[in-house]
Amino acid sequence: MTDARRSTSGVALVLGSCVSLQFGAALATQLFPDLGSWGVTALRLGIASLVMLVVARPRVRSWRGGQWRGVIVLGVAMAGMNGFFYASIGLIPLSAAVTIEFVGPLLLSALLSRRRLDALWLAIASLGLAAIGVESMAGVAALDPLGVAFALIAAVFWMGYILASARVGSSVPGSSGLAVALAISAVIVLPFGVPGIASAEIDARVVALAVATAVLASALPYSLELSALRRLPRHVFSILLSLEPVAAAFVGWMLLQQPSGPLRLTAIALVIVATFGTTTTHARRTRPPVAHIEAAGPPSPAANHTF
């Protein structure tokens, strides 16, 4: 696969992940009154891990120590990222939580990038995200400090998720590493979610929403992102994740009847410009094989497999 095709397919995978995640989040909010934020997180991670384990059927006996360490770190990162993010949206508006959490990928992109053009696209994306944050917080008297703290903690775990996912994607073939990492994250979150699950009245509606949330907010987007990280350098992937708040605005308008004013539309335009810029400049670059390996990690037997 040529660099241009790898870049294009990587962008498509990230787009699919962003939209899927936000649809899943919109569904998850309907379960908060029944299960609580940690209960929802535990249930969807548990269901998603079962689905992925059945699909991937990981052969863990052949894994080496380095592969296990990467998968365990990924599981811990996914548990913290999901648990604290859902705890935050239980206290502050979804759009505000997404904007605050995005501090993680933006900071990671700034730390990993060594090109001036990437810094320019990052700055433009940051302006768009700032505009989304201002628009989403307009008219809000105050944000719950604990909710803000939870979103910031989720941002730190999101940075760890990007790094660990890139490592697992390059060292563990297929989706086996993701499946086991999801199971680890579900086990970590389960003690926090048991009280909400135990006290809830589980009926067909709750089960259906939980399954849909697990697929849309966990299994599908994480599979897409793992595949995208095999096609894109980590700092480019981080900048492309700036589509996350844009997807949240779109899903909020379509499913939750949240209007999009001029400020939000301007923010979306800025993020689209940044995304287009970083994608096209990356695709046009000619890089020697050694440089490509350093940026994207060692090749994997499943490097060209799309989940």
Image (cartoon, grey):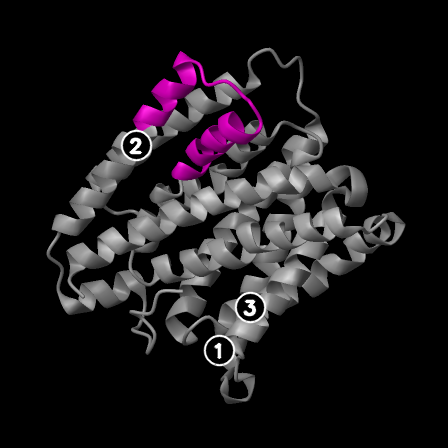
The residue lying toward the viewer, choosing from 123 and 241, is 241
Mark 2 and mark 1 lie on one chain; the one further toward the N terminus is 1
Residue 198 appears in which quarter of the rendering? bottom right
Which residue corresponds to the image point at 78% horizontal and 53% vertical from the top-left?
192
Q: Which residue is mark 1?
A: 66
From the top left corner, tell me how far across and down residue 154 is, in percent: 59, 44
Mark 2, residues whose alpha carbon is within 10 Å: few (<14), some, or many (≥20)? Answer: some
Q: Amino acid at mark 1?
A: Gly
283 left or right of 31 in image: left
Residue bearing the label numbered 2? 272
Q: Is residue 168 left or right of residue 218?
A: left
Nearest the viewer among 228 and 43 is: 43
Q: Is residue 99 above or below residue 224?
A: above
Residue 217 picture location, percent across and down: 56, 50
Q: Which residue is mark 3?
A: 52
Q: 275 left or right of 220?
A: left
Secondary structure category for the residue under label 1: helix
Question: Which image quadrant: the N terminus?
Answer: bottom left
Q: Tell me the distance, in whole angstroms, between the alpha carbons under discs 3 and 1.
A: 21 Å
Q: Secondary structure at mark 2?
A: helix
Query: Looking at the magenta stretch, what is its main secondary structure?
Result: helix
Instruction: Please report the residue visible at 66 percent of the width from the left and 61 percent of the height from the top.
Output: 47
Q: Is residue 265 magenta?
A: yes
Q: Residues within 10 Å of mark 1 (few under 14, many from 20)?
A: few
Mark whose residue sits in front, 3 or 2:
3
Q: Magenta stretch?
A: 243-270
Q: Are marks 3 and 2 in contact (CB under 8 Å)?
A: no
Amino acid carrying label 3: it is: Met
